[in-house]
Image (tube, rainbow, N blue to C red):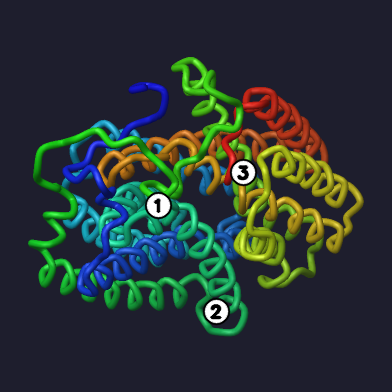
Amino acid sequence: MPGDRPTLTTADPAVSPLAAPRRSGLTGTGVCAAAVFGLLIVGSNIPTPLFPIYRVDLALTTATVSALFAVYLFALVVTFTLVAGSPLSRHASRVLPAAATAAILGDVALVLGADQLGWLFVGRILTGLAVGLGTGSAATLVLATHGERGRAIAATGTLIGSFLGLLGSALIAQYLPGPTVTVYLVHIALLVTALALLGTALIRNRRELHRSLHPSGDAVPVELSPRHAPDLPTPDAGPASATPARSRRLRAAGYCLGISGWAIGGIVVGLLPTIIAQEWSSSTVLTTALAPTVLIGAACLAPVLIRRLPPLPVLVLIAVGAVSCTAGVLALNLPAILIACAIWGAGQGFAYASGLRIVTAGLSPIPQGRAASRYASVCYGCTGILSISTGIAATAFGAGTAMIAMAAVFVTFTGATAVAGHRRWPAGI
């Protein structure tokens, strides 16, 4: 019966437009878009290994360092909110190049910030603007050019870009001269190259790309099936799962799952390097970057090695990781911290991507881009609040107390998420 299952609007009732074969030209455009997006995420993570250097060179407090991390997130939230409520997703082929340009300007500001704190904040804001514009537009372009395979590009690109940004920045800062300048110059060169390739691909394939983003024809509702929309989660709780209230609760649980996963970065990426530098005064740039690198590396590898993990075990991993990391900081035990980050990262690798699939399931390219921006806005906003709150607590009461409070927040939130999604989690995520 109509209404028993979700429907998809398409001009051909036999097949979803997202499942249609793609020309090699369009595929190349999608690859270029994904590469630009990955470099935007790389740029957002470059400062992380440099935060301890900025703290010493510019005489910053832990609260200021956490604010420097959080201002990027708040710039993201503002941008995501504006994008999600605007028609910008229809102009993804213009928005993504604009995002790359903003990222280049952000790198220039960060170079100037090597000895001026104000420029660091300007650079972080521009980087947030770039990632905010790039997330939805890249998701739109990749879904339009790669079909259903490109649905989770925002989650995958975020994790891989984060890992490469952290590791590359740490290595360059450790072994090359000018640690707070050289890495940004390298990133600018990569962005300029990727932007040129993307622009060429967009110009060559502009007509076919326009048809993919704006399919013509009379819309005919088509019942979704695994063949038509392989990434659409299939509820495992029976017919009642299709009711509007249940769907809203599932979407809310999907948002909470993403928040649980991504808020980890606010602590491990934005704050932990500074705490480690304070507690281990002889630590090198590579040492302070170990925790976030292990976290993001585990987040990238876990989905590849394990393939699938239901939400409840994911939430357990996140809660256990938070408690274990706090215990490692209190014991001043770096190996314990790194083990905790590996546990935490495994949970993060599944949480953010699974939440994104839940809240964007069955959407076509333009709504997908808007939904991806809205989802990221909520996740990053909550991450920024947790990060700056923990940084202020660390400055006022010490790192140990701040970490205990943070762990209590994670345990409480993951527990609430598990309750919200109980018997509603879709199969296949």
What is the number of the mark on residue 261? Answer: 3
Residue labelled with disc 1: 151
Give the quadrant of residue 98.
Answer: bottom left
The answer to which of marks 1 and 3 sits earlier in the sequence is 1
Query: Mark 1 touching mark 3, by CB under 8 A?
Result: no
Q: Percent position (x, y) of residue 429?
A: 58, 45
Q: Is residue 353 left or right of residue 210?
A: right
Q: Residue at coordinates 13% horizontally, 68% vertically from top-left?
A: 205
Q: Amino acid at mark 2?
A: Ile
Q: Residue at coordinates 27% horizontally, 49% vertically from top-left?
A: 15
Q: Amino acid at mark 3?
A: Gly
Structural distance between the alpha carbons of marks 2 and 1: 33 Å
Q: Residue at coordinates 61% horizontally, 35% vertically from top-left?
A: 386
Q: Is residue 117 left or right of residue 407?
A: left
Residue labelled with disc 2: 172
Structural distance between the alpha carbons of marks 3 and 2: 28 Å
Structural distance between the alpha carbons of marks 1 and 3: 19 Å
In front: label 2 or label 1:
1
Q: Residue at coordinates 23% horizontally, 70% vertically from top-left?
A: 198
Depth order, front residue of 157/310: 310
Give the quadrant of residue 387.
Answer: top right
* SS category of the residue bearing label 3: helix
Question: Which residue is situated farthest in the front direction here?
Answer: 1
Q: Percent position (x, y) of residue 350?
A: 61, 50
In the image, residue 2 above or below residue 25: above
Q: Amino acid at mark 1?
A: Arg
Question: Which residue is situated farthest in the right direction here?
Answer: 331
Depth order, front residue of 148/67: 148
